[in-house]
Image (cartoon, coloured by chain):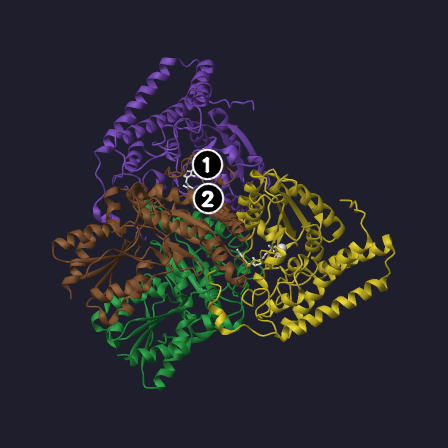
Chain colours: A purple, B yellow, C green, D brown
Amino acid sequence: MSAEIPIQDVEHWLSLYEQMYRIRCFEEAADNLYTRGLMPGITHLYIGEEAVAVGVCSVLRDDDWITSTHRGHGHCLAKGSDVGRTFAELLGRSTGYCGGKGGSMHIADQDTGNLGANGIVGGSTAIVAGAGLSAKLRGTDEVAVGFFGDGALGQGQLYESMNMAALWKLPVLYVCENNQYGEYTPNDQTIAGEILDRARAFGIPAHEVDGQDIREVSRVAGDVVAAARRGEGPSFLQCTTYRYRGHHVGDVDRPYRTRAEEEEWQATRDPLKTLADWLEAEFGVAADVVEQLETEVRTAVDDSAAKALDEPIPEDSEVTTHVYA
Amino acid sequence: MSAEIPIQDVEHWLSLYEQMYRIRCFEEAADNLYTRGLMPGITHLYIGEEAVAVGVCSVLRDDDWITSTHRGHGHCLAKGSDVGRTFAELLGRSTGYCGGKGGSMHIADQDTGNLGANGIVGGSTAIVAGAGLSAKLRGTDEVAVGFFGDGALGQGQLYESMNMAALWKLPVLYVCENNQYGEYTPNDQTIAGEILDRARAFGIPAHEVDGQDIREVSRVAGDVVAAARRGEGPSFLQCTTYRYRGHHVGDVDRPYRTRAEEEEWQATRDPLKTLADWLEAEFGVAADVVEQLETEVRTAVDDSAAKALDEPIPEDSEVTTHVYA
Amino acid sequence: MSTPNGAVREITYGEAVREAIVEEMRRDPTVFMIGEDIGAAGNVFKILTGLQEEFGAARVIDSPISESGIAGIGVGAAMTGMRPIVEIMFGDFTTFVMDQMTNQAAKTHYMSGGKLRVPMVLRTTMGAGRASAAQHSQSLHAWLSHVPGMKVALPATPRDAKGLLKSAIRDDNPVAIFEDKMMYSVTGPVEEEEFLIPLGQAEIKRPGRDITIVATSSMVQEALTAAERLAQVGLEAEVVDPRTMVPLDTDTLVESAKRTSRAMIVDEGCERYGVTGELASVIADGAFYYLDAPVRRLGAMNVPVPFAPSLEEQTIPNADGIFETARTLCGAA
Amino acid sequence: MSTPNGAVREITYGEAVREAIVEEMRRDPTVFMIGEDIGAAGNVFKILTGLQEEFGAARVIDSPISESGIAGIGVGAAMTGMRPIVEIMFGDFTTFVMDQMTNQAAKTHYMSGGKLRVPMVLRTTMGAGRASAAQHSQSLHAWLSHVPGMKVALPATPRDAKGLLKSAIRDDNPVAIFEDKMMYSVTGPVEEEEFLIPLGQAEIKRPGRDITIVATSSMVQEALTAAERLAQVGLEAEVVDPRTMVPLDTDTLVESAKRTSRAMIVDEGCERYGVTGELASVIADGAFYYLDAPVRRLGAMNVPVPFAPSLEEQTIPNADGIFETARTLCGAA
Ligand SMILES: Cc1ncc(C[n+]2csc(CCOP(=O)(O)OP(=O)(O)O)c2C)c(N)n1
Ligand SMILES: Cc1ncc(C[n+]2csc(CCOP(=O)(O)OP(=O)(O)O)c2C)c(N)n1
Ligand SMILES: [Mg+2]
Ligand SMILES: [Mg+2]
């Protein structure tokens, strides 16, 4: 698909670059925290997929909603969450977004419209339609965006949701992050037929997007979000992408795929590199400008991680609060 | 779709006519038993849809499997169950197929390969794939046919099932009996997009069939069952049909649709009339031949119903048997 | 039954449910309903007739047959400012909403550290007795009662049906309400003026000194019938209806058992690993030093509900069985 | 632990599960497995490594992420001559199979009047303790234990894991097995030669005269640890492991409690409306006239499992809590 790049100023693209880079640094720091034994549990890194979350969220308003997945840090930050409080949540600290009770897989941030990561594959595919229905019933023009992996295509609830969203013309955007694998299984073993046709069968317009090119992601997402906002109903995006790391931080051997495949993606389709190259070619943004921005971002992220480590763990009494509202 | 009628002898078509007529008489008798207060609970009549079950089952072997629905008497008889034992089950008698413990909504007959009616809409859409997988794993060329209503298109499990049946090329035939309504709701309110596309999205060949014309049903079913038997994987049939009566025997007012609509279907698309007319035109089968056959069938069915009423109810001790095998 | 002050009418349980919904939908524009055949058809038990006419198809939404989908939609709508009432036609189909209720609705508030809320009502049915066989007769309220974050109500009378449902709609948590479908046509006194019944308050439906019969849903009436007969043989049974499984009014149950020194539990869910075990344990533990006999449980038989009426009948606790068990328990002191 | 005759090796709980499956698949060509990431990946807990290599992709089937679909496929395959083992990666996802297990698998034999059978095993996990938070830490075995027609096993040792699973595979009914994921790497003695452990037979994991501690799954080890410490303060605890929730070996539980006259129940499911209520009631009823103290229950806290390890830890019963409760109970005589 040839990307018709919307003409926007360089600042816009630089800010998206910065956001993508922030996510990458965040994830590297999270990995580091895990490796050093400082983070409880495991976590799923978004490295390689940054253009999807940042591209989609770049066309959303603060009052739009997203639902996220077990691989949710990227969505969280892209929708506007603070790096420090996100780290704090991953570390189970009382200053985290969920007071340390949710952790990586359940991080939610009501204030930025993030209805939460989800440990259930496909678990939010109907919730997002509920948010869309709510937007409509409340008479707003809010849009609800559901991120989910290719693995969630196996869950029947997604189809129930798409059927209803189509019937009732809900302002919902289904974003399938097709990173080629569900855990350790390549998805040609788990997906029959054509992904886009699954949405189209319900009368939902569906588009395949290069998830490694934020220009394309944001352009197509912009169009379909605008359509949803105008009351034209749901759309579906399949974003072709790749997770550079293992399924989770502990999955380091990755016997289910080759190193060559990984290197190919990283060398030729890295979302950061793609954008940086274009910024240089199109706007003459010099490499050292980008480097300086990177240095600043990385320093800030690493500082936040270090600070989060000093945050307190929850009071023991927190175990029984918030069971009921 | 223009029906290319397979050339088979008149006996074949007469036997299918007889089977359809038997089902109609059976259902009328069931309604009568209900109306006279002789049948416990309620039941869902198949009147009007006979060509679907009989057409599809006419191309099946004894060792093929079917899964059925809450509207299951037609499937049951078409697959070869005995009228008397079916009545006995509807009446909760110990001589019924399930010893009176299942009733209309759970009638099953292992001997004819009927894995059971099902009170859960969509509840057997994955079970049928399991039967298909079993046929394959056991190294047989058995085929598994799943009947389900248009209402079951709302259930996510159907899509999970189709995905797996397609991936593993299971010998499964999905038969959607689209009778225009799910209970009291016309299905244009509940089905977005195109039904056939929902199967095709999974790479499953899908066909729309006039469910009121048994010649077309059996021809298309014959083709796709043969394909499944050859190992070519699943198919999907959408049989357009109509239930003449209410959703269940107690639904007599039917405010959700017009009498005119009902009369139109019955006058112009009745499966019995369509076949009888063709038999006369094509083979010169006279009206009185058909009438005599009808009289014999009706007498036999009514006798069976009367006999079933004399069958014993289960021993009280049966309540605790068969909880575990 | 405690008679409320003010005008009292006799209305059916079904009408009471309808009134609760109508009043709350009039009061609060964020309340809406979604379910199968609830629109023009007015629900399969015909208790919601006219609802869609009054509130429109946007607020009384006829859904496809997609139980897990509508539960999920309820959760999402509840998180974002609405108060959905999701109707699951038969309690037997709550099998499909277990993920949304358990992993999403019930946990969201906690997992988000108190930020998100899921003020959602799941209305469904329970109970056998209609020759509807194994998949349309179950009483599955034990499952959701086991899930922290859920509240669970089992109204036994028209008045409770109305008052508990109104409270549930206003509650900021997911609340599941199980309505016995055989009771929709049962009438009872319900005052004209508005009232709420708080979740978590048991009601002593009949006072008595000899034995405590804790009964839920339609079993309350069976227990009251049994109590009449027990009175004829000189035994005064106290019938206690917990009304909500969660929160559970432990105090009222335990105090009653302490007073009577004998207790039994009657519930229409299957006995094994059902709610009777919890209720019996709460009493056996809390009133241990006061009990003259073991706490007896009377749940449904541990069998799928059979179709044949003569078999089905055996599976459900009834007044006869309650009478016999209570008499034996009292004799066993 | 009763030592079997013959050669005894120490193997892990995970290896024991694998051995059971391998032996049964070699013995019976109708046995097959289906689940997510069980093929080349050998299951997420790496306990099925090599299985697909030995039996091929047709008998060790890697499925899409479709829990309800694979449960339904299991039911259909079981009805038609196969013996499927359906793996649900985390017990938390059994939410998706409740319809297939409850309305189909468990009821088919009964509804068909004994004609159809569903010889199917549902293998899944339970247990917290890994900072996996609310959706990957639950112990939901109470639900399926409530469903007539289901059998439910909770193996506590490698030997039980093997023997119970082999019995489950040969059983003609649907059997759910909950394996505590923290135990996969725990070792224990398992004899070389083939053996089965019947479903429905409790095991006294440690004899004692002062108090009966009924414990399930990983709580058995906690109870044994507590028992050691109780012995140091002069109290001999009998640790009884029911091993299967259904069928339940009521006799062994009740007889033990009669001997010791005190009993407590420890289980990792949430306490409220969980299995502890049933087990406590069975004992409180059966041993009523022998008990010197109320039967105490120690389930998981009635909260979603929190992420932060210091909070999570509080929610699960452990040896300390068992020790304290047992000592109090014994002092309370
Ligand atoms: C209902 C459910 N089934 C299984 C799992 C275990 N699981 C966690 S992530 C995952 C793979 C998800 O793949 P995909 O949706 O493609 O997301 P990705 O990890 O590739 O981003 C699985 C199977 C789960 N969390 N929830
Ligand atoms: C899971 C589930 N949800 C709802 C119902 C209630 N119900 C019974 S039949 C029916 C309509 C089914 O419509 P369809 O599949 O089109 O079959 P038809 O009755 O038209 O033959 C409904 C909603 C049910 N039995 N199971
Ligand atoms: Mg993926
Ligand atoms: Mg229909």
Taking the spot 40% from the left edge, 60% from the top edge, the residue there is: D146
Q: Which residue is mark 1?
A: D54
Q: Chain of mark 2?
A: D
> Is the CB of the residue bearing disc 2 within 8 angstroms of ligand 1?
no
Taking the spot 58% from the left edge, 46% from the top edge, the residue there is: B135
Q: Mark 2: which secondary structure?
A: helix
Across and down, in percent, residue D261 comes to 21, 66
- Choose between B10 and A154: the one closer to the eye: B10
Across and down, in percent, residue D142 comes to 36, 56
Quarter the C terminus of chain D occupies: bottom left
Q: Earlier in the sequence, mark 2 or mark 1?
A: 2
Q: Mark 1: which secondary structure?
A: helix
Query: How would you rate the neighbour count of disc 1 (Cα within 10 Å): few for under 14, some for 14-19, many for 20 or more?
Result: few
Query: How would you rate the neighbour count of disc 2 (Cα within 10 Å): few for under 14, some for 14-19, many for 20 or more?
Result: many
- Give the Cα separation between the discs numbered 2 and 1: 10 Å
Across and down, in percent, residue D143 comes to 39, 56
Q: Which mark is residue D25?
A: 2
Taking the spot 37% from the left edge, 37% from the top edge, the residue there is: D46
